Image (spheres, rainbow, N blue to C red):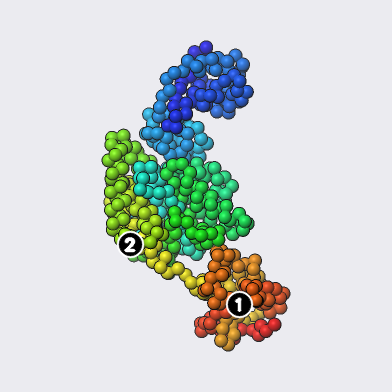
Amino acid sequence: MSTQIRISGHRAASGQRYIHVETDQGSATLRLEQFSLANSRLAGDLAAAGFPVFTKKQLEEVVGEVPYVTDFQDNRVAEHPGWNGKFFVQQDGSAIGSDAAPWVMFTPKPGATRKRGTLSAWQAEVANSVKAQPLVASAIMAAFLPPVLHLMPQAVNATIEIVGPSGTGKSTALMLAASVAGPVSSIASMRDVLTDPESARRDGRDHLLIVDHVHPAVITTAKTKKADLFVSTAFDLVRAPGGRVTLLSGRWPLADACDMEPEGNILTLRANGDGLGVFSALPPDAENAPAFAAKLVSAARKNHGHALPAFVARLQADLIEDAAKVRARLAKHHDDFLRHSRVAAAGGAERQAAGIFASLYAAGCLARRYRVLPRQFLCKRLALAALDHYRRAQAAQVPFVDRLEALIASGQIVALNAGSDPALQAQAVSAALGTVVVRATSRIVRIAPESILKAFPDWSRIKGSAEVRAVLKMDGKNSAVWGKLAPGMERVRLFQFELPVHPELTLFTGTETGAGPDDRE
Protein backbone atom coordinates (compact mmCIF):
# COMPACT_ATOMS: atom_id res chain seq x y z
CA MET A 1 0.00 0.00 0.00
CA SER A 2 1.15 3.57 -0.64
CA THR A 3 3.00 5.09 2.33
CA GLN A 4 1.09 8.30 1.72
CA ILE A 5 -2.08 6.77 3.21
CA ARG A 6 -2.13 6.46 7.01
CA ILE A 7 -4.69 4.31 8.83
CA SER A 8 -5.37 4.17 12.57
CA GLY A 9 -8.00 2.56 14.80
CA HIS A 10 -10.04 4.27 17.52
CA ARG A 11 -12.64 3.11 20.02
CA ALA A 12 -15.48 5.36 21.22
CA ALA A 13 -16.76 5.36 24.79
CA SER A 14 -19.77 3.37 23.53
CA GLY A 15 -17.45 0.57 22.43
CA GLN A 16 -17.99 1.28 18.73
CA ARG A 17 -14.75 0.94 16.74
CA TYR A 18 -13.72 3.40 14.03
CA ILE A 19 -11.07 3.57 11.33
CA HIS A 20 -9.35 6.87 10.55
CA VAL A 21 -7.87 7.23 7.04
CA GLU A 22 -5.60 10.15 6.25
CA THR A 23 -3.46 11.55 3.43
CA ASP A 24 -2.06 14.98 2.69
CA GLN A 25 -5.19 15.60 0.60
CA GLY A 26 -7.76 14.81 3.31
CA SER A 27 -8.98 12.45 6.00
CA ALA A 28 -12.09 10.58 7.08
CA THR A 29 -13.30 8.54 10.03
CA LEU A 30 -15.94 5.82 9.56
CA ARG A 31 -17.20 2.85 11.54
CA LEU A 32 -15.06 -0.27 11.19
CA GLU A 33 -17.84 -2.32 9.59
CA GLN A 34 -18.21 0.21 6.75
CA PHE A 35 -14.81 -0.77 5.33
CA SER A 36 -15.88 -3.55 2.97
CA LEU A 37 -15.73 -3.81 -0.80
CA ALA A 38 -19.29 -5.11 -0.61
CA ASN A 39 -20.30 -1.69 0.72
CA SER A 40 -21.22 0.15 -2.48
CA ARG A 41 -21.45 3.42 -0.57
CA LEU A 42 -17.96 3.30 0.92
CA ALA A 43 -16.27 5.54 -1.65
CA GLY A 44 -19.05 8.10 -1.38
CA ASP A 45 -19.00 7.99 2.42
CA LEU A 46 -15.23 8.49 2.49
CA ALA A 47 -15.48 11.41 0.08
CA ALA A 48 -18.33 12.99 2.03
CA ALA A 49 -16.27 12.69 5.22
CA GLY A 50 -13.29 14.42 3.61
CA PHE A 51 -11.22 11.65 2.05
CA PRO A 52 -11.47 11.53 -1.74
CA VAL A 53 -10.90 8.08 -3.28
CA PHE A 54 -9.96 8.55 -6.92
CA THR A 55 -9.55 4.97 -8.15
CA LYS A 56 -10.90 1.49 -7.46
CA LYS A 57 -7.34 0.31 -6.75
CA GLN A 58 -6.92 2.97 -4.08
CA LEU A 59 -10.17 1.91 -2.43
CA GLU A 60 -9.05 -1.73 -2.50
CA GLU A 61 -5.74 -0.71 -0.88
CA VAL A 62 -7.55 1.03 1.97
CA VAL A 63 -9.97 -1.85 2.58
CA GLY A 64 -7.13 -4.37 2.38
CA GLU A 65 -5.16 -2.66 5.13
CA VAL A 66 -8.04 -2.33 7.61
CA PRO A 67 -7.91 -5.97 8.89
CA TYR A 68 -4.30 -5.33 10.00
CA VAL A 69 -5.42 -2.58 12.39
CA THR A 70 -5.45 -4.24 15.81
CA ASP A 71 -4.72 -1.35 18.14
CA PHE A 72 -7.81 0.77 18.79
CA GLN A 73 -7.01 3.88 20.82
CA ASP A 74 -9.47 5.33 23.33
CA ASN A 75 -10.33 8.95 24.13
CA ARG A 76 -10.41 10.35 20.60
CA VAL A 77 -13.83 9.70 18.98
CA ALA A 78 -16.67 12.16 19.68
CA GLU A 79 -19.97 10.47 18.83
CA HIS A 80 -22.11 13.26 20.30
CA PRO A 81 -21.81 16.51 22.29
CA GLY A 82 -21.13 16.18 26.00
CA TRP A 83 -19.24 13.41 27.74
CA ASN A 84 -17.56 10.86 25.47
CA GLY A 85 -15.80 8.74 28.04
CA LYS A 86 -13.17 10.82 29.82
CA PHE A 87 -13.40 13.92 27.64
CA PHE A 88 -16.15 16.46 27.04
CA VAL A 89 -17.15 17.76 23.61
CA GLN A 90 -18.84 21.09 23.08
CA GLN A 91 -21.54 21.65 20.49
CA ASP A 92 -19.04 23.12 18.02
CA GLY A 93 -16.96 19.91 18.13
CA SER A 94 -14.14 21.27 20.30
CA ALA A 95 -13.02 18.99 23.12
CA ILE A 96 -12.08 19.52 26.75
CA GLY A 97 -9.78 16.89 28.25
CA SER A 98 -8.69 15.18 25.04
CA ASP A 99 -4.99 14.92 24.17
CA ALA A 100 -5.77 15.85 20.56
CA ALA A 101 -8.66 17.18 18.53
CA PRO A 102 -11.36 14.47 18.43
CA TRP A 103 -12.75 12.74 15.39
CA VAL A 104 -16.23 14.30 15.40
CA MET A 105 -18.96 11.89 14.34
CA PHE A 106 -21.87 14.33 14.66
CA THR A 107 -22.62 17.54 12.79
CA PRO A 108 -21.04 20.35 14.83
CA LYS A 109 -22.58 23.78 15.19
CA PRO A 110 -19.93 26.39 14.34
CA GLY A 111 -20.17 29.40 16.61
CA ALA A 112 -22.39 27.70 19.21
CA THR A 113 -19.68 28.10 21.86
CA ARG A 114 -18.00 31.20 20.47
CA LYS A 115 -16.10 33.17 23.12
CA ARG A 116 -16.05 36.89 23.60
CA GLY A 117 -14.64 39.07 26.36
CA THR A 118 -13.16 37.38 29.41
CA LEU A 119 -14.25 35.12 32.24
CA SER A 120 -13.42 37.76 34.83
CA ALA A 121 -15.54 40.34 33.00
CA TRP A 122 -18.42 37.85 32.79
CA GLN A 123 -18.12 37.19 36.52
CA ALA A 124 -18.13 40.90 37.35
CA GLU A 125 -20.72 42.19 34.88
CA VAL A 126 -23.11 39.23 34.57
CA ALA A 127 -22.87 36.80 37.50
CA ASN A 128 -22.19 39.40 40.19
CA SER A 129 -24.91 41.65 38.81
CA VAL A 130 -27.58 39.01 39.55
CA LYS A 131 -26.23 37.83 42.91
CA ALA A 132 -29.46 39.14 44.50
CA GLN A 133 -31.83 37.85 41.80
CA PRO A 134 -32.96 34.29 42.68
CA LEU A 135 -34.87 33.47 39.46
CA VAL A 136 -32.13 34.69 37.12
CA ALA A 137 -29.43 33.13 39.29
CA SER A 138 -31.27 29.80 39.11
CA ALA A 139 -31.20 30.00 35.30
CA ILE A 140 -27.44 30.59 35.41
CA MET A 141 -26.87 27.69 37.83
CA ALA A 142 -28.91 25.49 35.49
CA ALA A 143 -26.20 25.90 32.83
CA PHE A 144 -23.71 24.08 35.07
CA LEU A 145 -26.02 21.20 35.95
CA PRO A 146 -26.14 18.98 32.80
CA PRO A 147 -22.42 18.04 32.84
CA VAL A 148 -22.66 16.77 36.45
CA LEU A 149 -26.01 14.97 36.32
CA HIS A 150 -24.35 11.64 35.53
CA LEU A 151 -22.52 11.99 38.84
CA MET A 152 -25.73 12.53 40.83
CA PRO A 153 -27.98 9.45 41.01
CA GLN A 154 -30.20 11.35 43.44
CA ALA A 155 -30.92 13.99 40.78
CA VAL A 156 -33.11 13.78 37.68
CA ASN A 157 -33.17 15.34 34.25
CA ALA A 158 -35.60 18.24 34.29
CA THR A 159 -37.30 21.06 32.43
CA ILE A 160 -37.40 24.53 33.94
CA GLU A 161 -39.79 27.10 32.52
CA ILE A 162 -39.99 30.81 33.29
CA VAL A 163 -43.48 32.08 32.53
CA GLY A 164 -45.28 35.39 32.62
CA PRO A 165 -46.60 38.21 30.44
CA SER A 166 -44.43 39.84 27.80
CA GLY A 167 -42.00 42.43 29.09
CA THR A 168 -41.20 40.62 32.34
CA GLY A 169 -37.58 39.77 31.48
CA LYS A 170 -38.00 36.07 30.67
CA SER A 171 -35.78 36.28 27.60
CA THR A 172 -33.21 38.22 29.62
CA ALA A 173 -32.90 35.31 32.05
CA LEU A 174 -32.42 32.92 29.13
CA MET A 175 -29.75 35.11 27.55
CA LEU A 176 -27.75 35.26 30.77
CA ALA A 177 -27.96 31.48 31.11
CA ALA A 178 -26.82 31.11 27.49
CA SER A 179 -23.76 33.31 28.11
CA VAL A 180 -22.32 30.58 30.35
CA ALA A 181 -21.55 28.42 27.31
CA GLY A 182 -21.71 30.75 24.31
CA PRO A 183 -23.42 33.67 22.59
CA VAL A 184 -27.08 34.52 23.14
CA SER A 185 -27.67 33.59 19.49
CA SER A 186 -27.33 29.95 20.56
CA ILE A 187 -30.84 30.09 22.06
CA ALA A 188 -33.30 28.00 20.07
CA SER A 189 -36.95 28.79 19.42
CA MET A 190 -39.73 26.27 19.90
CA ARG A 191 -40.16 26.24 16.12
CA ASP A 192 -36.53 25.07 15.82
CA VAL A 193 -37.33 22.20 18.19
CA LEU A 194 -40.50 21.26 16.30
CA THR A 195 -38.77 21.43 12.92
CA ASP A 196 -35.67 19.48 13.94
CA PRO A 197 -36.24 17.51 17.16
CA GLU A 198 -33.18 15.31 16.52
CA SER A 199 -30.95 18.39 16.56
CA ALA A 200 -32.51 19.49 19.84
CA ARG A 201 -31.89 16.08 21.39
CA ARG A 202 -28.29 16.17 20.19
CA ASP A 203 -27.59 19.73 21.35
CA GLY A 204 -29.13 19.13 24.78
CA ARG A 205 -26.91 16.17 25.68
CA ASP A 206 -24.90 17.23 28.77
CA HIS A 207 -25.60 20.86 27.78
CA LEU A 208 -28.36 23.23 28.86
CA LEU A 209 -30.92 23.37 26.04
CA ILE A 210 -32.48 26.84 26.01
CA VAL A 211 -35.74 27.37 24.13
CA ASP A 212 -37.42 30.76 23.81
CA HIS A 213 -40.59 31.88 22.02
CA VAL A 214 -42.62 28.89 23.16
CA HIS A 215 -45.95 30.77 23.04
CA PRO A 216 -46.06 31.63 19.29
CA ALA A 217 -45.34 28.03 18.35
CA VAL A 218 -47.99 26.65 20.68
CA ILE A 219 -50.85 28.93 19.63
CA THR A 220 -50.28 28.16 15.95
CA THR A 221 -50.08 24.40 16.53
CA ALA A 222 -53.21 22.41 15.73
CA LYS A 223 -55.13 21.22 18.77
CA THR A 224 -54.52 17.60 17.88
CA LYS A 225 -50.75 18.25 17.72
CA LYS A 226 -50.42 20.09 21.04
CA ALA A 227 -50.26 16.84 22.99
CA ASP A 228 -47.41 15.72 20.72
CA LEU A 229 -45.60 19.02 21.32
CA PHE A 230 -45.98 18.64 25.07
CA VAL A 231 -44.83 15.02 25.08
CA SER A 232 -41.79 15.74 22.90
CA THR A 233 -40.72 18.63 25.15
CA ALA A 234 -41.67 17.33 28.58
CA PHE A 235 -40.77 13.67 28.04
CA ASP A 236 -38.70 12.94 24.92
CA LEU A 237 -36.07 15.63 25.49
CA VAL A 238 -35.78 14.82 29.19
CA ARG A 239 -35.48 11.07 28.69
CA ALA A 240 -32.90 11.13 25.90
CA PRO A 241 -29.38 9.91 26.82
CA GLY A 242 -27.06 12.12 28.85
CA GLY A 243 -27.57 14.85 31.41
CA ARG A 244 -30.62 16.84 30.34
CA VAL A 245 -31.85 20.21 31.53
CA THR A 246 -34.15 22.27 29.30
CA LEU A 247 -34.81 25.93 30.04
CA LEU A 248 -38.00 27.36 28.49
CA SER A 249 -39.80 30.68 28.55
CA GLY A 250 -43.41 31.39 27.66
CA ARG A 251 -46.44 33.44 28.52
CA TRP A 252 -48.11 30.42 30.14
CA PRO A 253 -46.88 27.13 31.55
CA LEU A 254 -46.35 24.63 28.76
CA ALA A 255 -48.92 22.23 30.23
CA ASP A 256 -51.60 24.94 30.26
CA ALA A 257 -50.71 26.14 26.77
CA CYS A 258 -50.97 22.58 25.45
CA ASP A 259 -54.05 21.82 27.55
CA MET A 260 -52.30 18.97 29.38
CA GLU A 261 -51.91 17.95 32.98
CA PRO A 262 -48.74 19.34 34.61
CA GLU A 263 -45.72 17.03 34.60
CA GLY A 264 -43.66 16.65 37.79
CA ASN A 265 -40.28 17.11 36.11
CA ILE A 266 -41.29 20.55 34.81
CA LEU A 267 -40.42 23.27 37.30
CA THR A 268 -42.53 26.37 36.64
CA LEU A 269 -41.08 29.68 37.81
CA ARG A 270 -43.48 32.61 37.44
CA ALA A 271 -42.18 36.10 36.74
CA ASN A 272 -43.43 38.71 39.20
CA GLY A 273 -46.48 40.71 38.19
CA ASP A 274 -45.42 43.79 40.14
CA GLY A 275 -43.37 45.46 37.43
CA LEU A 276 -40.11 43.74 38.40
CA GLY A 277 -40.71 40.61 36.32
CA VAL A 278 -37.90 38.09 36.84
CA PHE A 279 -36.14 40.41 39.28
CA SER A 280 -36.68 40.46 43.04
CA ALA A 281 -35.43 44.01 43.50
CA LEU A 282 -33.54 46.59 41.48
CA PRO A 283 -30.03 47.79 42.32
CA PRO A 284 -29.80 51.46 43.40
CA ASP A 285 -28.33 52.58 40.08
CA ALA A 286 -31.08 50.97 37.94
CA GLU A 287 -33.72 53.35 36.62
CA ASN A 288 -36.27 50.59 36.10
CA ALA A 289 -36.51 46.88 35.31
CA PRO A 290 -36.20 47.26 31.49
CA ALA A 291 -33.09 49.42 31.90
CA PHE A 292 -31.54 46.88 34.27
CA ALA A 293 -32.37 44.03 31.88
CA ALA A 294 -30.84 45.92 28.95
CA LYS A 295 -27.63 46.45 30.92
CA LEU A 296 -27.40 42.74 31.76
CA VAL A 297 -28.02 41.66 28.16
CA SER A 298 -25.37 44.08 26.93
CA ALA A 299 -22.88 42.58 29.38
CA ALA A 300 -23.77 39.05 28.26
CA ARG A 301 -23.30 40.00 24.61
CA LYS A 302 -19.84 41.37 25.39
CA ASN A 303 -18.72 38.49 27.63
CA HIS A 304 -19.75 34.90 26.99
CA GLY A 305 -18.54 31.38 26.31
CA HIS A 306 -15.88 31.22 29.04
CA ALA A 307 -17.65 29.88 32.13
CA LEU A 308 -18.70 26.39 30.98
CA PRO A 309 -15.33 25.38 29.46
CA ALA A 310 -13.55 26.58 32.61
CA PHE A 311 -16.00 24.62 34.76
CA VAL A 312 -15.76 21.41 32.75
CA ALA A 313 -11.95 21.57 32.59
CA ARG A 314 -11.74 21.71 36.40
CA LEU A 315 -14.41 19.02 36.74
CA GLN A 316 -12.65 16.72 34.29
CA ALA A 317 -9.35 17.09 36.17
CA ASP A 318 -11.07 16.34 39.49
CA LEU A 319 -12.77 13.25 38.04
CA ILE A 320 -9.43 11.87 36.91
CA GLU A 321 -7.94 12.49 40.34
CA ASP A 322 -10.83 11.13 42.45
CA ALA A 323 -14.28 10.71 40.89
CA ALA A 324 -15.76 9.28 44.10
CA LYS A 325 -14.83 12.45 45.96
CA VAL A 326 -16.64 14.60 43.38
CA ARG A 327 -19.76 12.44 43.66
CA ALA A 328 -19.68 12.62 47.46
CA ARG A 329 -19.32 16.41 47.38
CA LEU A 330 -22.31 16.80 45.04
CA ALA A 331 -24.41 14.42 47.14
CA LYS A 332 -23.56 16.35 50.29
CA HIS A 333 -24.65 19.64 48.71
CA HIS A 334 -27.86 18.05 47.42
CA ASP A 335 -28.78 16.58 50.82
CA ASP A 336 -27.80 19.77 52.62
CA PHE A 337 -30.17 21.83 50.50
CA LEU A 338 -33.08 19.46 51.07
CA ARG A 339 -32.57 19.73 54.83
CA HIS A 340 -32.63 23.52 54.67
CA SER A 341 -35.66 23.53 52.34
CA ARG A 342 -37.89 21.88 54.97
CA VAL A 343 -39.67 19.54 52.54
CA ALA A 344 -39.85 16.48 54.81
CA ALA A 345 -43.61 16.82 55.21
CA ALA A 346 -44.30 18.42 51.83
CA GLY A 347 -46.38 16.89 49.07
CA GLY A 348 -45.05 15.28 45.91
CA ALA A 349 -44.97 18.36 43.64
CA GLU A 350 -43.12 20.48 46.18
CA ARG A 351 -40.66 17.70 46.93
CA GLN A 352 -39.91 17.31 43.23
CA ALA A 353 -39.40 21.06 42.89
CA ALA A 354 -37.10 21.09 45.92
CA GLY A 355 -35.12 18.22 44.38
CA ILE A 356 -34.55 20.22 41.20
CA PHE A 357 -33.44 23.26 43.20
CA ALA A 358 -31.13 21.01 45.23
CA SER A 359 -29.51 19.87 41.98
CA LEU A 360 -29.09 23.47 40.80
CA TYR A 361 -27.56 24.36 44.14
CA ALA A 362 -25.11 21.44 44.03
CA ALA A 363 -23.94 22.37 40.52
CA GLY A 364 -23.69 26.04 41.51
CA CYS A 365 -21.59 25.15 44.57
CA LEU A 366 -19.18 23.21 42.38
CA ALA A 367 -18.92 26.13 39.93
CA ARG A 368 -18.23 28.43 42.87
CA ARG A 369 -15.61 26.02 44.25
CA TYR A 370 -13.90 26.07 40.86
CA ARG A 371 -13.96 29.90 40.96
CA VAL A 372 -16.11 30.06 37.85
CA LEU A 373 -19.02 31.58 39.74
CA PRO A 374 -17.75 34.45 41.89
CA ARG A 375 -17.45 34.17 45.68
CA GLN A 376 -20.30 36.66 46.16
CA PHE A 377 -22.69 34.37 44.27
CA LEU A 378 -24.31 32.73 47.32
CA CYS A 379 -25.86 29.62 45.81
CA LYS A 380 -27.74 28.38 48.87
CA ARG A 381 -29.37 31.71 49.62
CA LEU A 382 -30.33 32.17 45.97
CA ALA A 383 -31.71 28.66 45.48
CA LEU A 384 -33.69 28.76 48.73
CA ALA A 385 -35.14 32.15 47.78
CA ALA A 386 -36.11 30.79 44.36
CA LEU A 387 -37.79 27.81 46.02
CA ASP A 388 -39.72 30.17 48.30
CA HIS A 389 -40.78 32.17 45.22
CA TYR A 390 -42.00 28.93 43.65
CA ARG A 391 -43.94 28.03 46.79
CA ARG A 392 -45.63 31.43 46.97
CA ALA A 393 -46.60 31.24 43.31
CA GLN A 394 -48.02 27.76 43.77
CA ALA A 395 -50.00 28.86 46.82
CA ALA A 396 -51.41 31.80 44.88
CA GLN A 397 -52.65 30.08 41.76
CA VAL A 398 -54.67 32.66 39.89
CA PRO A 399 -58.45 32.03 40.11
CA PHE A 400 -60.38 32.00 36.86
CA VAL A 401 -62.20 35.25 37.64
CA ASP A 402 -58.87 36.98 38.27
CA ARG A 403 -57.60 35.73 34.93
CA LEU A 404 -60.66 37.28 33.28
CA GLU A 405 -60.07 40.53 35.16
CA ALA A 406 -56.43 40.58 34.03
CA LEU A 407 -57.49 40.25 30.38
CA ILE A 408 -59.91 43.15 30.81
CA ALA A 409 -57.33 45.30 32.58
CA SER A 410 -54.75 44.62 29.87
CA GLY A 411 -57.15 45.72 27.11
CA GLN A 412 -57.23 42.28 25.47
CA ILE A 413 -60.94 42.24 26.26
CA VAL A 414 -62.43 45.52 25.05
CA ALA A 415 -64.88 47.42 27.26
CA LEU A 416 -67.72 48.67 25.02
CA ASN A 417 -69.03 52.20 25.31
CA ALA A 418 -72.18 53.57 23.66
CA GLY A 419 -70.52 56.95 23.16
CA SER A 420 -67.51 55.70 21.22
CA ASP A 421 -67.02 55.93 17.48
CA PRO A 422 -68.64 52.77 15.97
CA ALA A 423 -65.93 52.29 13.36
CA LEU A 424 -63.09 52.62 15.88
CA GLN A 425 -64.89 50.36 18.34
CA ALA A 426 -65.46 47.70 15.65
CA GLN A 427 -61.75 47.87 14.78
CA ALA A 428 -60.78 47.43 18.44
CA VAL A 429 -63.18 44.49 18.84
CA SER A 430 -61.80 42.70 15.77
CA ALA A 431 -58.30 42.78 17.27
CA ALA A 432 -59.39 41.78 20.79
CA LEU A 433 -60.04 38.45 22.46
CA GLY A 434 -63.54 39.51 23.44
CA THR A 435 -65.71 42.29 24.83
CA VAL A 436 -67.14 43.38 28.16
CA VAL A 437 -70.24 45.50 28.64
CA VAL A 438 -71.35 47.10 31.91
CA ARG A 439 -74.92 46.68 33.11
CA ALA A 440 -76.52 48.03 36.24
CA THR A 441 -75.55 45.13 38.48
CA SER A 442 -73.03 43.13 36.47
CA ARG A 443 -70.50 43.05 33.64
CA ILE A 444 -70.99 40.68 30.73
CA VAL A 445 -67.84 39.29 29.11
CA ARG A 446 -68.19 37.63 25.71
CA ILE A 447 -65.50 35.62 23.96
CA ALA A 448 -65.89 33.95 20.58
CA PRO A 449 -65.14 30.19 20.42
CA GLU A 450 -62.22 30.79 18.06
CA SER A 451 -60.60 33.06 20.68
CA ILE A 452 -61.27 31.07 23.85
CA LEU A 453 -58.04 29.05 23.60
CA LYS A 454 -56.04 32.22 23.06
CA ALA A 455 -57.55 33.65 26.23
CA PHE A 456 -57.36 30.37 28.22
CA PRO A 457 -55.05 27.74 26.69
CA ASP A 458 -56.24 25.24 29.33
CA TRP A 459 -59.93 25.80 28.49
CA SER A 460 -60.70 22.16 27.71
CA ARG A 461 -59.47 21.18 31.15
CA ILE A 462 -61.08 23.98 33.21
CA LYS A 463 -64.39 24.57 31.42
CA GLY A 464 -66.21 22.07 33.60
CA SER A 465 -64.71 23.31 36.88
CA ALA A 466 -66.88 24.85 39.58
CA GLU A 467 -65.15 28.25 39.40
CA VAL A 468 -65.81 28.53 35.66
CA ARG A 469 -69.40 27.26 35.87
CA ALA A 470 -70.05 29.85 38.59
CA VAL A 471 -69.70 32.70 36.07
CA LEU A 472 -70.40 30.96 32.72
CA LYS A 473 -73.86 31.35 31.20
CA MET A 474 -75.16 28.05 29.79
CA ASP A 475 -77.74 27.29 27.09
CA GLY A 476 -79.01 23.99 28.37
CA LYS A 477 -76.07 21.65 27.99
CA ASN A 478 -74.35 24.00 25.56
CA SER A 479 -71.63 26.12 27.18
CA ALA A 480 -71.85 28.72 24.39
CA VAL A 481 -74.92 30.97 24.10
CA TRP A 482 -76.26 33.14 21.30
CA GLY A 483 -75.13 36.75 21.34
CA LYS A 484 -73.16 39.53 19.66
CA LEU A 485 -69.61 40.56 20.48
CA ALA A 486 -70.67 44.17 19.92
CA PRO A 487 -73.75 46.00 18.63
CA GLY A 488 -74.09 45.68 14.86
CA MET A 489 -72.09 42.45 14.67
CA GLU A 490 -73.43 39.06 13.62
CA ARG A 491 -75.34 37.03 16.20
CA VAL A 492 -73.35 33.86 16.89
CA ARG A 493 -72.70 31.48 19.73
CA LEU A 494 -70.29 32.95 22.28
CA PHE A 495 -68.88 32.06 25.65
CA GLN A 496 -70.51 34.52 28.04
CA PHE A 497 -69.39 35.22 31.60
CA GLU A 498 -71.08 37.38 34.23
CA LEU A 499 -68.90 39.34 36.65
CA PRO A 500 -69.82 41.83 39.38
CA VAL A 501 -69.62 45.52 38.49
CA HIS A 502 -66.13 46.94 38.91
CA PRO A 503 -66.38 50.57 40.06
CA GLU A 504 -63.19 51.65 38.29
CA LEU A 505 -63.74 50.02 34.90
CA THR A 506 -62.42 52.23 32.09
CA LEU A 507 -64.43 51.96 28.91
CA PHE A 508 -63.20 51.80 25.35
CA THR A 509 -62.65 55.52 24.73
CA GLY A 510 -60.62 55.94 27.87
CA THR A 511 -62.49 59.17 28.61
CA GLU A 512 -65.84 58.03 29.97
CA THR A 513 -67.07 55.62 32.64
CA GLY A 514 -70.57 54.47 33.31
CA ALA A 515 -73.20 52.23 31.80
CA GLY A 516 -72.44 50.50 28.52
CA PRO A 517 -74.58 50.36 25.41
CA ASP A 518 -77.97 48.75 25.39
CA ASP A 519 -77.08 45.28 24.17
CA ARG A 520 -80.51 43.69 24.44
CA GLU A 521 -81.10 41.16 21.68
Indicate which disc residue 56 carries: none
Q: Quadrant of the C terminus?
A: bottom right
**Which residue bears the numbered disc 2?**
345
Numbered marks: total: 2
Q: Is residue 98 left or right of residue 59?
A: left
Q: Is residue 464 left or right of residue 373?
A: right
Residue at left offset 50%, top offset 32%: 105
Q: Nearer the viewer, residue 222 or 251?
A: 222
Q: Secondary structure at mark 2?
A: loop
Q: Is residue 239 left or right of residue 479?
A: left
Residue 443 image position (x, y, % from top left): 57, 81
Q: Nearer the viewer, residue 71 or 380?
A: 71
Residue 306 in view in this figure: no
**Relative vertical location of residue 222 with respect to residue 79 in this rendering, above or below:** below
**Which residue bears the numbered disc 1?**
473
Residue 64 in view in this figure: yes
The residue type indicated by label 1 comes to Lys
Q: Is residue 449 left or right of residue 377?
A: right
Local packing at callout 2 (Cα closer than 10 Å; few below 14, some 14-19, many 20+) is few
Residue at left offset 36%, top offset 60%: 387
Residue 29 image position (x, y, % from top left): 51, 26
Residue at left offset 56%, top offset 77%: 471
Residue at left offset 59%, top offset 85%: 439
